[in-house]
Amino acid sequence: MTRIGKIARTTLKGLAIFLSIVVGAVVVILTTNVGLRLALRVGLPIYNDKIAGSVAIEAAEGSLLGSFTLRGVTLSDREGRALITADAIAVDWSPLALLGRDLAVDSLLLERPRVYLPGLGGSFADIAPPGDDTPKDMSEPPGPNLPLGIAAALHLRDAAVYFADGAPIVEAVDLDLRARGIGRAAEAEVLAGRGRLLGSREIEELALRARWGSPVAAVEGLRVVADAASLEIPEAQLDVRSWRMIVDVEARAALGLLAEYLPPGSLEKLKTPAGTLELAVAAEGVPEDMSAEVRLALAPNLALRLAGAGAWRGTPEADITVAADVDLAPWTQARLGRVRPTLELHARQMPSERLALAGGLGCPECERLGGVSLDVDGVIDPAGKNLSLEAALDAAGIGALVDVTAVGGALREIDWRLAVVDVARAAAVGRQFARVPELDGTLTGRGTCVGPDLRCAGALELRRVDAPGVAIEQARVDLDVLQGMSGGTVAVAVEALRAGGQTVERGEVRVDVEKLAPGPVAPPVPAALPPLLARVRAGALGPGARVELDVSVRTGQELRADLDMLKAELAGFHAELEQPARAVLSGTKLQVEDLALQIAGGRLAAAGVVDADGPSDLKIDLTGLALARLRPLVPKLRPAGLASAHVRVHGRPEAPSIAADVRIAGAGLKGGRFGDLAVAARLADGRAEVDAALRGPLARELELRAEAPVHVNMSQRTGSIGQAYTKVELRAQDLRLDRLQPWVKRPEIAGKVDGMVLFEAHTSEGPLASPRVVTEWRAEDLVIAGAPVGDVMVSVTHRGEWLQGDVDLHRSGGRAQVHVQVPIELDPLRGHFAWHRERQHRVLVQLDDIDVADQLDSLAPGHDAAGKLTLRAEMTGPVSKPELQAELRGEGLMHRRIALGSLSLQATMRDGGTAVDLSGGGGQIGRFQVRALAPVALDDSGVRWRRDGWYALTLDLRELELAPLEPLLGLNLGGRITGGITFDGAGRHPKLRGAVRADRLSFKGQPVGAMRAELEFRDGLAKVAGHGRFGKRTTLELGGQVPLDVDLRSGEFAWATERPGKIDLDIHKLDQDALEPFSPLPQQALVALNVHAHAEVDAEHVRGKALVSGEMGHKVLGGLPIKVQLDVDDAKQALRGSFGRRTEKGSLTFAVDTSASIPAIRAKQAKLTDAPLRGELKARATDLRYLSGFFPEAIYDFTGFFTSEITAGGVLGKPKLRGTARLQKGGVTVVALQQRFRDLNFEVVADGPEVKLASLTATSGEGRLKGSGGVTFASGGKLDAEAELSLSKFPVVRPGLPQMIVDTRVRAGVKRSPAGLGVAIDVHGAEVWVSDLTTRAPDPLPENEHVKIVTGPLPKLQAAVGSQAAAASDREPPVVLAEERTLPPTKAPPSTEIERSQLDLEVRLKAPVHIKGPSMDMNWSGALALHRKGEEAEVTGGFRSDRGRFELLGNRFTIDQGRVFLPEDASTVDPYLDLTADTTTPQAEVTVAIRGRLSRPELKLRSRPSLAEGQIFALLLTGTADTQESDPKKTQASAAGLLVNFSNPTLSRFADQKLGIDRIKFGFADDVTQPVLSVGKHLTKKIYAETTYHHNAPARTNRIEGSVEYRFKPRWSVETFFGDAAVGGLDLFWRRSFGRTGTEGKLGPVPPRDPAPTPTPTKQTAKAGTGR
């Protein structure tokens, strides 16, 4: 027992020690890093032995029972190429969970994992151990069976997948995934993911939720977002056992992402670069019964749908539907409008493997295409290559049906039908794509092609076809032909054909073709044809016309044509074949037999042989041909003359002889006559001669003679010009250029020309080195395009290597000469031309005694230029380096009535530079001198500018007067400028210095002051300093420096912001006198301000300050202190201001603060409109009387107390206002309405985007006005506004309209959006009381037999009546002018904004408007709507009065009809009035029509029986139509009062004849508040007196002024004026007209051709004035 116990104890001890060792080893392996490395060292070789590839780990950290990290992990294929790598794999798991049969991995982190797709010879199978060979039990559910419950969290950091060549698929992938599963169920969820796809596309979002429950795998949600693309799978399921599936996939991508995968420019061609591509896929079913749908949308233009159902396994079946909806508007909008075709095609597989097709193409939105519809139905048998197809087309009014049958791949039958009911409709559609003429008529047809040879028979019929120049009542085409036209018949018949002024009552053409048996072999024709016999028979019959033709053509080895009949009669043209004729072409031989034709009164005969390989002898004779009878054939040429010709070709083909004689007596074309023409040509023995002579109306004699060695070889088809003597000579004598107008339309030329052209080469004395060319032409009284050129002589000679030319022009006493000498080699015979640019050239241009006025008199009548010019310019040297010298001198120059004085210009160009010296003056503008040097020169490439060369410029101005320069500058400036500017330096570093002084400056006649400025630019810095005095007290000081980058080499001129710059501005004692010339303030405004501003800018910072202080107010009430301060820096900007004394009641303060980052705005990294804004406006009962002086003159005496408490926030681009603003105890007079509004009160409440008019009240007379409303601002420029206005006994006073009292209530709504503006106005009834319609006229002016009345603005009045002196002409009697014309609106090209704008205006009278008064009673009702989009407008509705009455001139008129409407084109919102009314008098029934714009209607009178308007007016006024019996005073007062309201020229003249003065002028001075009335009278023929009243005249301007003009000599007159402002003057005028012939000493009024006053061309004036 003891021994056994010992053994047992020993065994137990050993077992315990062994277990301890094992447990210790396991603990060491599982809990220590050494154990981990030991496990890898043992396990990896074992795993590597089982796989084809290998697994390598560089290092390991941690332990197996806790967390561990494997570093440098690489999995390679059998070739040693890495498939998977990772910098580190970190595992954090819970071993204790294994006790509960769970595997819990808290974190599995892979750092920088890389997956490489295997290349050739590699596979991911190389890193997996081979599977178990035990057959799978198919009764078990598919998929793995997890023995443990697994829960893991996977994290990928900077992962990537690459193609085998190393190109990236995805990179920089960060992924967080959670998965769990047990048994045969599992689920996984991607919590977050991002990366980069294909090297450039950022994966912004990745989310996935999937599950597995055997045998079904499901994706419950997948979303991938990369840049502007996304992929979503809302649902997907797959049963791996039965293969039943459900899939739903949606994808979207911006087209811009696809640009790099498409050909360049594809997106631009698609016109959807900003569009999107959308794809949706849905499928459901099992392979034996599956349905699927695919939708593709290319926003916004394409929608495609593909749906199918069928079996994929077993017996294949398919049922597929394709549908597409395409919007082609981006391509077709401009030409065709919107085109949106739709396509639907259904294909079904039949049991016999045949395919049935059905579907069609439609276009519901193809209005301009006339609608498109195509239907297809048929069956296709691919195995037997059989086809049966029916197609129907209906497009643009064209209907077509086609049935096609094919058997065994060959066509067997085609049946077609065609119907075009209205050809005009089809032509209109075709005209949008090509030049299709106007067509009209119908077209029908039907035909069939059957049989193996496709014998086709059919017919086309046209009825009532009308086209430009052609009309056909009926036409028919019948055909019965074989394929290839190898046999059959074609017949064309027409009835009532009209074309080219000719009519064919009946016509027919028939072609019969039959196949012939092969004949004997003959020499082949150049293009062999199959043996056929074609016979063409044609006939036509019409009024005075008849045509018959019968010709047969045989083809084969030879070509033969037999002309059996030819007879034609047409409008005097007659042609008839005398006997049958024949022509045979056999090989190269053409034989003509018995061709004789009576034609156009003559005879044409041809017979003989022409052979390119043998002797020829062909004669052609033409006698007695009257060319005028050919006009029906060539109506545009209209030939004339009697022609005869004899031509013979004979001899061997190596050297044929040709003789031709042509004569035309009285030749002419297009109505013009040339004369008698004779042409003789000969070719014999290798020499050709041509003699042509023309004598007649075109030229006294025009001869052309030419002779040259010419060699012709017909057998070789060659021709050449030899080296023997050659001469061409053309001589003209008295060639009349105006006779060429029928053939040379542009330019129009006239004159007489004599001259010659001679060309000689290879003279009898021996060959010349080069041909000789001599030409001399002389033209007298040459006129081109209506401009007289004068007498011109041109001489050009060429001999050797020199071309010399001279042009001498004499015109209007002046002379111009041009001499040219150029080294040119010219040989037309050898085709040689050479210009030696490197040799010396010489061009001389010289102008002598050029009187500018004389030269321009005939070219530009009415010009005002004068002076004399002399010019000499010469260019010498080679083209690569020419030298130019020019000298121009002018004396007594004048332009635009400015006496410029003399001018001297000297210019030299040599050695790569140009120097210019220009000086002048001595006239009205003073003197000036300019000297310049620039690196500009000419070479063979043109003008060359060495931008880095040296520049110099000196400008010297000596007392330059600005007033005479107004026509050139376009500004009414006055004063004198003296100074100079010097500029020099290289192109990269120029320097500039200058000083300018301006004295006695004035603007628009108002004195401004004086200024002095100094400028310097050097080393990239511009400095400016200036000071001036304006008005009486205002002074200005300006100084600053601005860094500029100026580089003349590149032409760059920019502000160098990287260097500092600054500017200072000081203005002291700024008042009304200083502002008057530029922006005149109202007379009552008071201004006394000081301005100081300082700004500094550099590359990084902006700083500035500005301060305005002083007083502003009313001249009567006095001024209040004002202060405005602006502070600007890089980050903050502040504006502070106050008006009034802040401690007192009535002050106004405002403050605005912004936080705009100016550096970011300058760098275009931010927008100014996005800057934060904070501001406030506070007013405490501010008295508006102090500000009323600053309102425009149309607003008078604006009073009241303004209170405000408004704050602003948000950003600059979209401020938000909050608070209230009120006006109390206000009043205002509106001058234009001649009406004062009292008790004016309003309150405005602002709350963010909404602004409300809480209340508005006012009174005028006994009337009262109430109003309210609101406006809401929305993003995108949208606006909604509503307003309501109520008037109670409210008076309305408008000049030109009767006084009215109105009771009404009006509601208005306004909606504005980027698309347009909508306005709706509802008038809820109105009662309008109107005073007497006819306004009382003023007392008449003194009577006189002569009257001149002009209405309109003052400038147009002056232009219409001319100067006073002109009106006083002894020879021009005064006339009566009292007519005001309304010109149609000027239509300017629409701007882009107008083209895109849209306006919807509606005015509705909810209840009738009742207008009543002593002289009228009527009701108006209706509604008016205006819809305008771009230039297209539509106006509907209007206002109508169908009953009522009114009184006119004491007569009661009953309204027949009355309408108020807008014009159809909506060119104005000034409505039109159309009203007619009738009344009855003892002598006649009178109808009055009032039509025209409501602001100025026209009055028309007519009667039955018919009377003149003056008689009707007298009839209505006095009861009798006799104007002599009417009371003159009553007549003129009533007529003048009526004309205040209406425009009527007849009544105007009728009233004006009663007035007794010579001139009345009424207009306005600076604005409508300053009316000016002038009344003038001729006391004698030499003395004219005038008085003027100027209402609201400004300071230093006469309110009442008198003037007297006395003409004591025909050319001399004196004028004097004086007024109540102690302003007067004395003017002495001397007049002379230049540039006119035959009018000297005849003065008259200047025609009103310009809108501005037109003074006498030249005046010498001496003035003496007196001032206050």
Image (spheres, grey):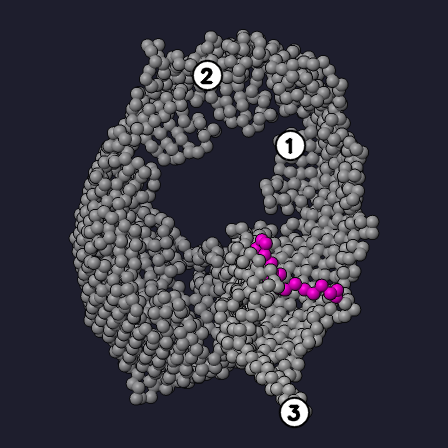
User: Cα distance, mark 3 to mark 1?
Assistant: 147 Å
* Quadrant of res 458: top right
Circle 2 crowding by C-alpha within 10 Å: few under 14, some 14–19, many from 20: few
Is the residue 1087 above or below the residue 1590 in the image? below
Circle 1 crowding by C-alpha within 10 Å: few under 14, some 14–19, many from 20: some
Q: Residue at x 21, y 41 (%)?
A: 907
Quick one: label 3 or label 1, which is nearer the N terminus? 3
Pointer 2: what residue? 720
Is the residue 1397 above or below the residue 938 in the image? below
Discs 3, 1 touching: Cβ within 8 Å: no
Does residue 1245 appear to the left or right of 363 in the view shown?
left
User: Cα distance, mark 2 to mark 1?
Assistant: 46 Å
SS assignment at label 2: strand
Q: Which mark is residue 2?
A: 3
x and y, in percent, of residue 903 in the image: 20, 43
Residue found farthest to the right? 352
Quick one: label 3 or label 2, which is nearer the N terminus? 3
